[in-house]
Amino acid sequence: MRFYLATGNKNKLREFRGMLGEVEPVSVDVEENGSTFEDNALIKAREACRITGNAAIADDSGLCVDALDGRPGVFSARYSEPGDRKAKILHELEGETNRSAKFVAAIAVVFPDGTEFTVRGECHGIITEEPRGSNGFGYDPIFFMPEFGKTMAEITPELKNVSSHRYNAIQAMLKELQSRGVLE
Ligand code: IMP
């Protein structure tokens, strides 16, 4: 199955290709004004389905920090200027001992006949005191994964692709597609 993915984010595209193989990016121009990851993933997938006439998928993802009441959450991509986002989180957590957080990825699948579903994957970790590592993207350098003793930016892309929130969401999506008879 060829997956049409609504995204303009080359990092996400690279990860999806690493996990699914053939993935065709579709550029969508929509306002991500949903209040949940699932809502925003659906907004993007519906538009990609409309543009291509094919079944389409979209991911909406972000970082939820417990001590910040789940922020930045759905606002992860717009929490502050690019480059300052990690610094803003670290600043907000100065002196905070509860540094637990999770990455969340919701994937929406939309078919031309109007059928649609969403799945969610999570990955739990700890916000570091300072950024570490240069792999990955976004908040990866401040997200410590206790199971590996490294940040998400210090593990290899291959390891991220079998342990991340996006990996968990994709596994749930594949399972759902199989149970609906869309995939073998
Ligand atoms: P979206 O394109 O609206 O889903 O934005 C997601 C934002 O959440 C990205 O721009 C990143 O800031 C953050 N994010 C999502 N997934 C990851 C990840 O795997 N690593 C680091 N940051 C992520």
Image (spheres, rainbow, N blue to C red):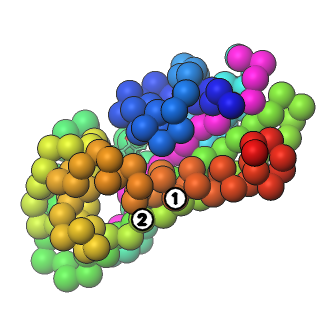
Of 53 and 66, which appears nearest the observer?
A: 53
Asked if the residue at tag 1 contacts the one at tag 2, i.e. Cβ–Cβ closer than 8 Å, the answer is yes
User: x and y percent of residue 102 in the render?
Assistant: 39, 66
Q: Mark 2 points at which residue?
A: 123
Residue type at mark 2?
A: Cys
Going from N to C along the chain, the mark reached first, 2 or 1, is 2
Total marks in image:
2
Q: Residue at x 17, y 54 (%)?
A: 154
**Furthest residue in direction bottom, as rendered:** 97
Q: Please indicate, yes or no, whether residue 149 appears anywhere in the rendered image.
A: yes
Residues shaded magenta: 52-65
- Which residue type carries mark 1? Asn
In the image, 156 versus 37, the foreground residue is: 156
**Which label sits in the foreground, 2 or 1?**
1
Residue at numbered disc 1: 168
Q: Is residue 54 left or right of residue 20?
A: right
**Label 1 crowd bin: few (<14), some (14–19), many (20+), radius 10 Å:** many
| 54 is higher (above) or lower (below) than 91 | above
Separation (CA) of disc 2 from disc 1: 8 Å
Q: In which quarter of the image is the C terminus?
A: top right
Q: In which quarter of the image is residue 100?
A: bottom left
Tell which residue pokes out farthest to the right in this image: 113
Q: Nearer the viewer, residue 160 or 104?
A: 160
Q: Secondary structure under badge 1?
A: helix
The answer to whether the residue bearing label 2 lies less than 8 angstroms from the nearest atom of ligand 1 is no
* Residue drawn where x is 10% and y is 60% of the image: 130
Q: How crowded is mark 2: few (under 14 residues within 10 Å), some or many (20 or more)?
A: some
Horizontal side of residue 33 vs 91, given as left or right: right
Give residue 21's position: percent from left, percent from top.
51, 32
Residue 177 in the image: state x and y as whole percent: 74, 48
Q: Does the residue labelled 1 lie within 8 Å of ligand 1?
A: no
